[in-house]
């Protein structure tokens, strides 16, 4: 059992009975899908699912962005997400006036960075996919964001992410642990990506991790680390370099800021963190508190830094942000052991070699 939050460990232990109940429900649900008591639907086009079996930050958004960058100039692709914590319901396609409140922060991030790519949200993906294809009939492939545990839609290619420091093999069911799906569900994946690895991961560590995951014969395991780009101003776009003479106020509202804090600790002279809950909807009072906290910092060479996911929830305060050194840190996955080309090749071949099933579009 792997507890990620030491201070919460006693509470999580007390919740152990609830974990057993949750596990029973999920195992029963999966059994019903496996026995075809619950039906799954496939569609007549390539669908790529990106997801995990645990809650928290395994790097789904950077992986979706990597897929978009890889595919958008080759095929008309679309992204479909649930739109977590948005203020709307039902199907919605991102447009020129869309905000994070309309579709959620992660889909808004995709839409902001790739405005020519169709980005849609819908709680029921089985209902949203036909609507998306109606709105974008030339779509050649769909990327399902955070959908591995949702089995109503059968994806043609499943990419499962698991964090190196918290492999699903060492975790436990919610709420005592972080697993929201059965550990054995990894068998449904086609590609497994171990994310947030150390840059200097050794061949021995790689081999030991693969042995622990115990992939099936058809499954391929990849390893990736985090690659941070140059911070850019949230409204003006100009970039800068963080150095050891700089003081940083870090603003985060993400599930797992630990890798970011580690990186910042190595780059900046010092930093302070204002940590909010994952997907936090920032208010003007939050912004005013950030500014007061920033103004109280003694160092003259200082900035405010946030993540791209948080930036899409802060940009509504554009006028206030204009006058402050408020920067956004981009992030990308970097494949280790020179395996990026092989990963890309597998994705492209899946789309180009896709053959619709005679059962596609009907319940099976």
Image: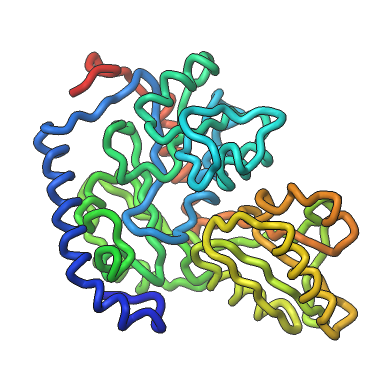
Q: How many marks?
A: 0
> Picture coordinates of residue 224 (x, y %)?
48, 59
Residue lying at the far front of the rendered structure: 285
Q: Quadrant of residue 24?
A: bottom left
Q: Quadrant of residue 181?
A: bottom left
> Picture coordinates of residue 104 (x, y %)?
56, 43
In which quadrant is the C terminus drawn? Answer: top left
In this rendering, is residue 6 above or below 163?
Answer: below
Residue at the spot x=76%, y=83% of the render? 269
> Picture coordinates of residue 12 (x, y %)?
30, 75
| Nearer the observer, 250 or 88 | 88
> Picture coordinates of residue 303 (x, y %)?
81, 70
**Is 171 displayed left or right of 243 in the figure?**
left
| Nearer the observer, 258 or 84 | 84
In this rendering, is residue 55 above or below 293?
Answer: above
**Is 246 displayed left or right of 104 in the figure?**
right
Q: Quadrant of residue 332?
A: bottom right
In which quadrant is the N terminus drawn? Answer: bottom left
Residue at the spot x=66%, y=80% of the render? 266
Residue at the spot x=86%, y=62% of the render? 324
**What colour-coding does the image apply?**
rainbow
Residue at the spot x=65%, y=59% of the render? 307
| Nearer the observer, 334 or 260 | 260
């Amino acid at each position: 059992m792997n507890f990620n939050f030491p201070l919460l460990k006693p509470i999580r232990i007390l919740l152990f009975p609830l974990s057993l109940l949750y596990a029973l429900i999920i195992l029963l649900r999966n059994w019903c899908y496996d026995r075809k008591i619950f039906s799954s639907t496939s569609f007549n086009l390539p669908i790529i699912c990106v997801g995990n079996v645990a809650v928290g930050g395994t790097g789904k958004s950077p992986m979706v962005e990597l897929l978009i960058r890889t595919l958008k100039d080759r095929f008309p692709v679309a992204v479909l997400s649930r739109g977590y914590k948005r203020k709307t319901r039902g199907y919605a396609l991102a447009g020129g006036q869309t905000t994070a409140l309309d579709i959620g922060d992660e889909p808004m991030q995709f839409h902001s960075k790739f405005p020519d790519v169709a980005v849609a949200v819908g709680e029921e993906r089985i209902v949203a996919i036909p609507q998306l294809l109606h709105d974008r009939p030339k779509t050649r492939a769909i990327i399902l964001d955070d959908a591995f545990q949702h089995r109503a839609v059968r994806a043609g290619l499943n990419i499962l992410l698991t964090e190196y420091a918290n492999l699903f093999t060492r975790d436990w069911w919610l709420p005592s642990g972080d697993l929201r799906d059965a550990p054995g569900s990894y068998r449904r994946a086609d590609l497994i990506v171990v994310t947030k690895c150390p840059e200097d991961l050794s061949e021995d560590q790689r081999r030991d991790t693969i042995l622990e995951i115990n992939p099936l014969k058809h499954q391929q395991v990849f390893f990736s680390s985090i690659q941070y780009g140059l911070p850019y101003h949230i409204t003006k776009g100009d970039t800068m370099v963080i150095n050891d003479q700089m003081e940083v106020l870090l603003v985060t509202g993400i599930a797992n800021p630990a890798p970011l804090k580690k990186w910042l600790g190595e780059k900046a002279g010092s930093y302070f963190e204002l940590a909010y809950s994952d997907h936090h909807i920032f208010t003007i009072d939050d912004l005013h508190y950030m500014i007061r906290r920033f103004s109280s910092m003694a160092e003259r060479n200082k900035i405010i830094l946030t993540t791209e996911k948080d930036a899409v929830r802060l940009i509504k305060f554009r006028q206030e942000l204009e006058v402050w050194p408020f920067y956004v840190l981009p992030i990308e996955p970097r494949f280790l052991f020179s395996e990026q080309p092989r990963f890309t090749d597998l994705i492209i071949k899946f789309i180009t070699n896709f053959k619709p099933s005679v059962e596609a579009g009907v319940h099976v």
